[in-house]
Amino acid sequence: MSVNENRTAAIAEIRAMIEDWAEAMRVKDAGRVLAHGTNDCLVFSLAPPLKETAAGAEGLEQWFSTWKGLLGYRLQELEISAGGDVAFATALTHLSGEKLDGEKAALWFRQTLGLKRTEKGWKIAHQHESVPFYMDGSFKAAIDLEPTSEVDWQAPSPPPMAGVIAYLGVQDANATAEFYGRAFGAKEVDRKYAEDGKRLIHCHLTINGGALMLSDPFPEYGCPWKPQEGVVLHLVVDDADFWWKRAVAAGAEVTMPLAVAFWGDYYGQLRDPFGVLWAIVAPVKEN
């Protein structure tokens, strides 16, 4: 058999293996997925940490358990190059499905597979997944792109957010964001879930025209929860009574009644159910 014939046969074998590997992802069969990899397969996945060795099925099973039903897992533009006992493949991969909380996810990402020939056939020795990020200073992952997407390099960058932005670590970022919507009229800009499908890596809210960021604790990455101390979030508003009554009705605890303070502002403090202190502030209106 000629060199070209050997290469063609290897590519066909690799393509069939990758197709079965992708089908195993779709049906969430961790054992079948890992059977296509080497024991020391190095994985650079979209999720933390920066690298890991996919030696066991426990982590993959845990991730599969965060999804309802089957996964959508499709490889597009699959290209395979092989020579001797090594090969690599590149593709654009579409992942879709429904999380346990009902959130529907769908994104494209880039995938590269490094393969080697073993006694049991071709195996994945290295898996690398990535998404681009926007180069406008936001460092936001570009998970809204599709294979046909084009970048408008002439589009103006969004203006930077002004001022100092509070970033709170709270015990339940989902519940906190929902409460802030009821109590302070918060509007959600962005929400990103961790791999467990429950905790929030990041939540961006706007309240009274300003930005507020939230995240859950991640003690496994050195970010444990700590109670809020010595911090008061100030809301300077036109109608303090309206803001105050809405927050109290939602469940905020009064710690300093709303009244005219000695420095001349109409001022009061509240504690939300998550331990964060808020001040409602308005200039005193002249009669």
Image: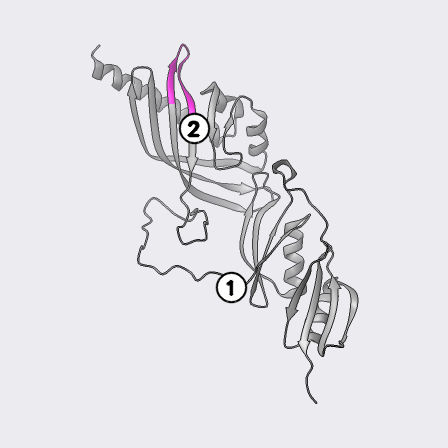
Q: Nearer the viewer, residue 193 or 224?
A: 224
Label 1 neighbour load within 10 Å: few <14, some 14-19, many 20+: few
Marks 2 and 1, how far apart in space? 40 Å
Q: Amino acid at mark 2?
A: Gln
x, y percentage for residue 286?
Answer: 69, 87
x, y percentage for residue 234?
Answer: 66, 66
Question: In the current view of this chain or complex, which residue is farthest to the front?
Answer: 263
Residue under circle 2?
127
Of mark 2 and mark 1, the one earlier in the sequence is 2
Q: Which residues are magenta?
A: 115-127
Is residue 22 shown left or right of residue 274?
A: left
The quadrant in which residue 76 appears is top left
Q: Is residue 67 magenta?
A: no
Asked which secondary structure carries label 2, the reply is: strand
Q: Is residue 125 magenta?
A: yes
Q: Residue 162, labelled with which disc? A: 1
Q: Amino acid at mark 1?
A: Ala
Q: Is residue 214 above or below residue 75?
A: below
Q: Main secondary structure of the magenta part?
A: strand
x, y percentage for residue 16?
Answer: 36, 22
| Residue that appears at 53% across and 42% down | 98
Is residue 155 shown left or right of residue 265?
A: left
Instruction: Name the front one of labels 2 and 1.
Output: 1
Q: Nearer the viewer, residue 215 or 29?
A: 215
Q: Nearer the viewer, residue 203 or 235?
A: 235
| Residue that appears at 41% across and 50% down | 134
Asked which secondary structure carries label 1, the reply is: loop
| Residue that appears at 65% across and 68% down | 235
